[in-house]
Image (spheres, rainbow, N blue to C red):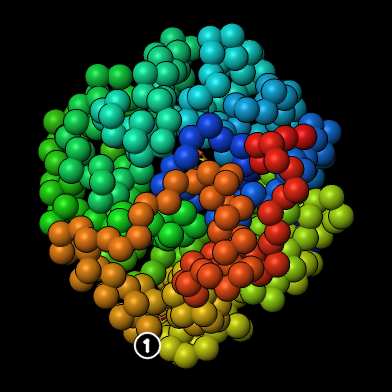
Amino acid sequence: MKLSEKPKEKNIAPPLWLLAEVTYRCPLNCVFCYNPVDYAKQHNELTTAEWVKVLREGRKMGAAQLGLSGGEPLLRKDLEEIVEEARKLGYYVNLLTSGIGMTEERIKNLKTAGLDHIQLSFQDSTKEMNDFLSSTKTFDLKKKVAGLIKKYDYPMVLNCVLHRLNIDHIEQILNMAEAMGAEFVELANTQFYSWGMLNRDQLLPSEEQLKRAEKITHKFRDRLGNKMKLFFIMPDYYSTRPKKCMNGWGNVFITVQADGMVLPCHVASMLPDINFESVRNKSLDWIWYKSPGFNKFRGDDWMKEPCKSCPEKENDLGGCRCQAFMLTGDPNAADPVCDKSPHHSKISEAVIASQKPSNYERPIVFRTDNDSRKIMQKRDKGQLDIRSSRLLERDSKPSKEKSRVGLV
Ligand code: SF4
Ligand code: SF4
């Protein structure tokens, strides 16, 4: 197909990655889930025809990589149709899955439809911890899916989100990955957004835990070399400079949520005073190039001190807007991860607290439809603390549907 040769608006590059969060339904209840805390406001997922329209529009703009995630994308019965259309359009199609819902028949059909890549997530190396951390009995099933991925000749890409409760099992996790024949393993420390932020005090590892985990990862890297490539992603709480979030706001990634809302990253709906648009009302092209939401934090005009006059601003563009808002209440502030930020103590205090043995006042919160609804209700009654209430879109309301979120 013919791609648009030039971006329509000066200085705005076209998106390269389209992230399609095709559903927020999920059989798992992960404590670090990156779905919005108020995801239960949604029940009206895009239909197959609407997703096909999104894919066409994205490809026309120049997007070449498609990530199909959720929730659990396999819960969409039309996933094969979506994959087939995406492949026809010329996307490289990635499926990010917990594996639940994958059967031999489905993987065969997905392969025929043209699926290029599967990333399978684990919670831990043992049945007990995997099942506790996802609040489901899914470990054995995931192992079967790993076997199917090999059988159908996909590269084995395992992802395990690390945190205080599982990071000490890293050796067992890597042994498990090796035994499964994994070619790539992503050990991504929890980043503290959404449900991860609600559970931050329980999930932030100590420095000693991180150092040990890094050491073990190096040991495996030295032994296995290219046979099993390891990616260890540090939590940014242990840095003094933030990351260039999403490689720049509205620069590379465009995320379409299950109900069609379009965002520069999967949690940006929490930011105040921005009306993000839906593909149900506007074209993807208009949203990317012209919408106030996507233009809000492009470039550096929005910055204030210390970022405005900072000689390093090109490196990180002031870090993450959502993290700045969650921790300071001001989306224009420097990301507090930066030690030049006047709010850096919000990060260092959490890090200091994490060095002590665990002693939590709050129970861990599992990501469930019910809890998502309850959190919105608590916010409406003024019973939610400020830090948690910033994780929700200001006026989000629980969907009236009593059934699982998102059923079409
Ligand atoms: S992080 Fe866990 S609960 Fe959240 S969408 Fe992924 S598998 Fe489901
Ligand atoms: S002050 Fe702002 S621009 Fe400078 S390094 Fe820190 S976050 Fe980045």
Query: Is label 1 in a helix, a strand or a loop?
Result: loop
Q: In the depicted view, which residue is nearer to us: 135 or 341?
A: 135
**Residue 161 vertical position relative to residue 305 in the rendered view, above or below:** above
Q: Would residue 93 be visible to someone looking at this image?
A: no
The residue drawn where x is 38% and y is 83% is: 343
Considering the image in quadrants, where does the C terminus appear?
top right
Type of amino acid under label 1: Pro
Q: Would residue 307 be visible to someone looking at this image?
A: yes
Q: Position of residue 128 (x, y in %)?
A: 28, 29
Q: Which residue is mark 1?
A: 342
Residue 363 in the figure: left or right of residue 79 = left
The residue drawn where x is 46% and y is 80% is: 328
Q: In the depicted view, which residue is nearer to us: 29 or 92?
A: 29
Ligand 2 closer than 8 Å to label 1 CB: no
Considering the image in quadrants, where does the N terminus appear?
top right
The residue drawn where x is 20% and y is 58% is: 358
Q: In the depicted view, which residue is nearer to us: 19 or 124?
A: 124
The residue drawn where x is 54% and y is 50% is: 371
Residue 230 in the figure: left or right of residue 309 = left
Q: Position of residue 26 (x, y in %)?
A: 56, 35
Residue 196 in the figure: left or right of residue 13 = left
Residue 207 in the figure: left or right of residue 95 = left
Q: Residues within 10 Å of mark 1 (few under 14, many from 20)?
A: some
**Residue 177 vertical position relative to residue 274 in the rendered view, above or below:** above
Q: Position of residue 175 (x, y in %)?
A: 20, 27
Q: Position of residue 332 (x, y in %)?
A: 55, 81
- What is the count of numbered marks? 1
Q: In the depicted view, which residue is nearer to us: 178 or 124?
A: 124
